[in-house]
Image (cartoon, coloured by chain):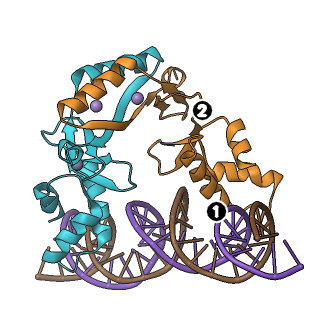
Chain colours: A orange, B cyan, C brown, D purple
Amino acid sequence: MILNAFLKSAGHSSSEELYDLIKRDDPSIGQATIYRTMKLLVDAGLARSVDFGDGIVRYEQKLGHEHHDHLICEQCGIHVEVVDSVIEELQEDLAKRHGFRLYRHKMVLYGLCAECSSE
Amino acid sequence: MILNAFLKSAGHSSSEELYDLIKRDDPSIGQATIYRTMKLLVDAGLARSVDFGDGIVRYEQKLGHEHHDHLICEQCGIHVEVVDSVIEELQEDLAKRHGFRLYRHKMVLYGLCAECSSE
DNA sequence: ATAGAAAATGATAGTCATTATCAATCGATT
DNA sequence: AATCGATTGATAATGACTATCATTTTCTAT
Ligand SMILES: [Mn+2]
Ligand SMILES: [Mn+2]
Ligand SMILES: [Zn+2]
Ligand SMILES: [Zn+2]
């Protein structure tokens, strides 16, 4: 049931948001179960957690959903998923230059979207 | 006194860490004051807050300390400050390509440092 | 100097997302 | 059906941080 709600959600939803959704179908569910299950989904490779820097853990689908970074409008909150393969390579190089073996990275770009900046 | 402790700290220290330091000189200080003061230092342009993704706000000096990103070893925790001007430009391009005006960005690279990977 | 206003401080309670605990329930296996 | 381990929901606890508020401390105008 939780997996279902997660899969049909728009993405970038938090455990709390999923809880509010699922509660409507089954008010007997406890929110601890949602928190627990989302971690299980991450371990199982079905979900990936993303950190937008607001202290809330959000999840996005992992299957057929390659790595990407995020572009967030600080005004209206919309977020766009982006990838720049050149940047990705340069990040590898940069890490290598410092003797690091790179496992993962986090890149979030904050700004104003087209709509919000035209206001 | 707080500014002093902050300036002579190695950098990337949290309010809590600074509190523990300062308490030794003046046990009468309250930790709320440290939290408040660090925010003031940010507003005053003397400090900048950094988010390593572990839920703790850390501060680093801003004066004569240009923008940079971080490379963190997930084993031993050391962090290296890095900048790659090409990446910085490409981030601007990437945002522009999506119609965004870029305000700031966050980039943290996680991996294993040279020492830790040779173990 | 000094009274009164304004700002800063410390102690402490509160917040919020998340985690731990634990008794109750479920479920597979015998 | 009895058993034992896993899962669940309710709820308490956690940890970083913020709000509150009475008490200093610091300004400011006299
Ligand atoms: Mn990336
Ligand atoms: Mn940068
Ligand atoms: Zn916008
Ligand atoms: Zn290391």
- Residue type at the position of mark 2: Leu
Relative to B117, is A71 above or below? above
Picture coordinates of residue D26, whole percent (x, y): 18, 69
Q: Nearer the viewer, residue A116 or B68?
A: B68
Q: Residue at x 54, y 35 (%)?
A: A77
Q: Which mark is residue A16?
A: none
As drawn, is A119 to the left or to the right of B82?
right
Picture coordinates of residue A40, whole percent (x, y): 59, 52
Q: Nearer the viewer, residue B63 or B52?
A: B52
Write down the residue under mark 1: A32
Which tag, 2 or 1, sits closer to the chain's start?
Answer: 1
- Residue type at the position of mark 1: Ala
In this rendering, the label closer to the viewer, 2 or 1:
2
- Can residue A12 be seen in this snapshot? no
Q: Nearer the viewer, residue B38 or A89?
A: A89
State ligand 2's quadrant: top left
Q: Residue at x 30, y 71 (%)?
A: B31
Q: Which mark is residue A63?
A: 2
Dot 1 surroundings within 10 Å: few (below 14), some, or many (20 or more)?
Answer: few
Q: Chain of mark 2?
A: A
Q: Which type of secondary structure does the marked residue at label 1 adopt? A: helix
